[in-house]
Image (cartoon, rainbow, N blue to C red):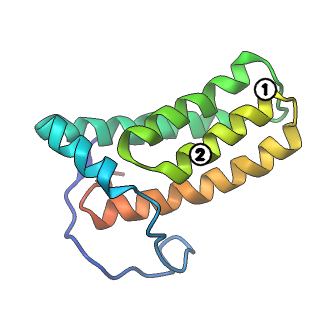
Amino acid sequence: MKYIEAENTTTHSADQTGIDKLSEETLDMGTFDGMRSVMEDDFNDLIEAFYQSSEEVFRTMDGWTEWGSEDEYRRYPHSLKSIAGNIGAMSLKELAAQCEAQITDNSLAEAQATYALIREEYQRVRQQLDSLGFAQAS
């Protein structure tokens, strides 16, 4: 899976994802631009890895009919926390850390509620990446 180049645009339709507008805090642009500067041509691989890893995490977590506090369940929000931080998706990173801690504390209903917020924030991150020209290929 590769990202596709998209025109950089500053207008966003609320109909695209059901989100009224982008949160300016969706991506920490200092972190994002810093990683882009350091990684140069390899930065595209980082974005591709973000999409692939996130989708794998969501496929797994969406499939949970029951949640537990075992390492297996903590591993996925922990992974998401790391990959989100790599690209500067700090709100997503914080939500993943919160979900991980809730699973550790066996607060599974709270973890599930946090997971719903994670899915919403992920859509905001994707929308902002799209606006920056890093749209995920279908």
Across and down, in percent, residue 102 comes to 79, 36
Residue 107 in the figure: left or right of residue 64: right
Residue 84: x percent and y percent? 46, 42
User: In the rendering, at what x and y percent does residue 99 appear?
Assistant: 71, 39
Assess disc 2: are there few (<14), some (14-19) or many (≥20) residues with their C-alpha within 10 Å of its C-alpha: some
Front-most of 28 and 122?
A: 28
Q: x and y percent of residue 47 in the render?
A: 31, 42
The number of numbered badges drawn on the structure is: 2
Q: Which residue is mark 2?
A: 94
Image height check: is 7 above or below 31? below
Q: Which residue is pictured at 56% across the width and 57% down the height?
A: 121
Report how far apart the C-alphas of labels 2 and 1 lie in the structure.
15 Å
Q: Who comes first in sequence, dot 2 or dot 1?
A: 2
Q: Given the image, on which type of amino acid does mark 1 rest?
A: Thr
Which residue in the protein does label 1 denote?
A: 104
Left or right: residue 36 compared with residue 16: left
How many residues crowd around disc 1 within 10 Å: few (fewer than 14), some, or many (20 or more)? Answer: some
Residue at the image position 19 percent from the left and 58 percent from the top: 5
Measuring 27% from the left and 55% from the top, which residue is drawn there?
134
| In the image: residue 138, left or right of residue 123 | left
Q: Secondary structure at mark 1?
A: helix
Using the image, determine if residue 55 lies above or below residue 16: above
**Residue 1 visible:** no
